[in-house]
Image (cartoon, rainbow, N blue to C red):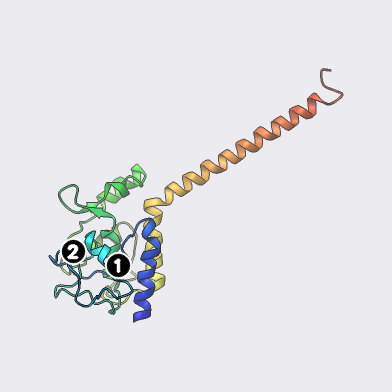
Amino acid sequence: MLKRNYVVYVMFIVMAGFLFPVPAASGQSTDQQANTGFPDVPSTHWAYEAIQTGVERGYIKGFPDGTFRPNDPVTAAQFIKMAFMSLTDDSRGFVFWSEKYLNMVPDWRRARLVQDTANFEDGTPWYKNYIETAKNNAFIHDEFDGRFDEPITREQAAKFISKLDTIFRGHHVREYSMLAGAQLVQGFLTRWTSICRNMWETSPFAGS
């Protein structure tokens, strides 16, 4: 169990520079203050700083009893909620996708993403709205049906992150690749035209 948690935490630490600055799992939310520590996460815990960062930024809040349970397996529902929450803010007066991240999505895909988002509030069961949003946007299909409370695997977590990456950043990567490719082709054609011109100008047929 601990090994699985370690891998999932590390996955989020690696992604911190892009979408997910919080490498920890989240259960049902509570009204616990963001600067309050968890009794089961001492400052000596290897993931202490990462967990505290997630709490301070509002992406994770621990369990109703005030604990974080760092050694419990990370479930699919917890993972999906935490990943989504790391892409949200409350600038609209309610929690929704952050404009910072929505601006990374093409207009046509952005409209669909917004339309297909349920909301980011706990429902019944608590993960209902997160799962509905994930399914509506094809981040998941039926692979977790009936098993949302079961531990998520490394492969499943990586696949989910990859799909989010494709929506929120993939088009930028593709556009950059296309632009870079066009520039390379243009550069090649320019150089080749210059070479041909020089060859012609220095040939015995030039001016004939």
Residue 103 x %, y % = 33, 44
Residue positioned most to the right: 204
Looking at this view, is 169 or 128 the one in front? Answer: 169
Residue positioned most to the left: 31
One can see residue 131 in this view: no
User: Does residue 44 sit above or below 82 in this rendering?
Assistant: below
Query: What element does badge 1 sit on?
Result: helix
**Picture quadrant of residue 71:** bottom left
N-terminal-most mark, 1 or 2: 2
One can see residue 132 in this view: yes
- Judge the density around disc 1: few (<14), some (14-19), many (≥20) Cα neighbours within 10 Å: some
Horizontal side, residue 207 vs residue 192: left or right: right
Which amino acid is tagged 2? Answer: Asn
Residue 97 x %, y % = 26, 52
Residues at marks 1 and 2 touching, judged by CB atoms closer than 8 Å: no
Spatial CA distance of label 1 from label 2 is: 12 Å
Residue positioned most to the bottom: 1
Residue that appears at 33% across and 68% down? 142
Quadrant housing the C terminus: top right
- Judge the density around disc 2: few (<14), some (14-19), many (≥20) Cα neighbours within 10 Å: few
User: Does residue 207 sit above or below 91 in this rendering?
Assistant: above
Residue that appears at 22% across and 71% down? 27
User: Does residue 185 sit above or below 37 in this rendering?
Assistant: above
Residue 50 x %, y % = 31, 66
Q: How many labels does the image show?
A: 2
- Residue on which the image places disc 1: 49
Residue that appears at 36% across and 57% down? 164
Query: What element does badge 2 sit on?
Result: loop
Horizontal side, residue 9 vs residue 32: left or right: right
- Residue on which the image places disc 2: 35
